[in-house]
Image (spheres, grey):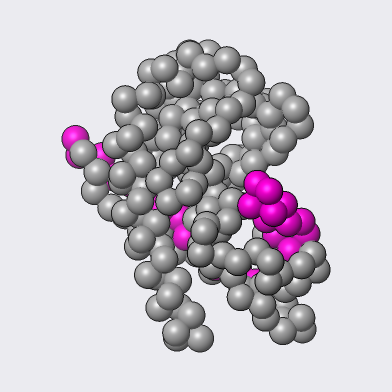
Amino acid sequence: MQQRTSRFVQLTLAAAAASVALLAASAAQAQQAANATQASSATPAVGDAVVVNMVAKITKIDLHDGVVDLKGPKGHTVAVGIDPTVADIKKLKVGDEVHMQYRGALLLSADKVDPKNTHSRVTAEQIAPASDGVVVRTAGVQVVATIQKIDPVTREVTLSGAKRIVTLKASPDVALDKFKVGDNVMATYVSATAIDVTRNGQIVK
């Protein structure tokens, strides 16, 4: 267990470093993203994650974890973490239509575990400095979950865990051919994280 925890921390640290680079790469595009069309789009980003632009409605707000659930125009749903340095989640409400630019959730590692294991969840937060006094908070999650879906083409994996169902982009280090639907896995991933949040063209601050 100690070895798993150490690996979890190492992966979270690495993800935080990647987030700093991603923030720098995305800063120049922030204004352009605010004027994006209502169709969602995705572009490659650091560490094989993607930066997604989506106009969506808020269906749920979790103030404790700082997470909002979004539903896009095609029914696509996603849970995105919002750091206070990016936007004030307390100023959002269910039903709001927002333009969200976020870094997609990234699966960093996965190992099969005993099917008798109950679902569990551990989180860690790594804070890393960026530029102009801005900091990046990377939410790492380690969870025992059940694989619901695997898409080998897009390399997306859907996991059903203790708190919610998440769809993750698998990093190149994860060999998806070793898993099948129904497998219980110990998965380590970085949650989807907001880069920019606007409502009616205004930053939510």
> Where's residue 25, x and y in %?
33, 35
Nearest the camera: 36 or 135? 36
| Prevailing secondary structure class for the magenta stretch in the rendered image | strand
Q: Looking at the image, how many numbered discs can be counted on the residues?
A: 0
The residue at the point 40 percent across, 46 percent down is 46
Which residues make up the magenta segment?
Answer: 132-159
Q: Is residue 68 left or right of residue 182?
A: left
Q: Is residue 71 above or below residue 171?
A: above
Furthest-right residue in this view: 182
Asked if residue 32 lies in the magenta stretch, the reply is: no
The residue at the point 49 percent across, 46 percent down is 49
The residue at the point 29 percent across, 37 percent down is 24
Q: Is residue 106 left or right of residue 145?
A: left
**Which quadrant is home to the C terminus?**
top left
- Residue 58 visible in the displayed image: yes
- Residue 141 visible in the displayed image: no
The residue at the point 36 percent across, 32 percent down is 26
Nearest the camera: 174 or 134? 174
Nearest the camera: 11 or 2? 11
> Where's residue 99, x and y in %?
54, 23
Residue 114 lies in what quarter of the image?
A: bottom right
Residue 203 lies in what quarter of the image?
A: top left
Q: Is residue 108 left or right of residue 117?
A: left
Furthest-left residue in this view: 132
Q: Is residue 48 left or right of residue 158?
A: left
> Where's residue 104, x and y in %?
53, 44
Asked if residue 146 lies in the magenta stretch, the reply is: yes
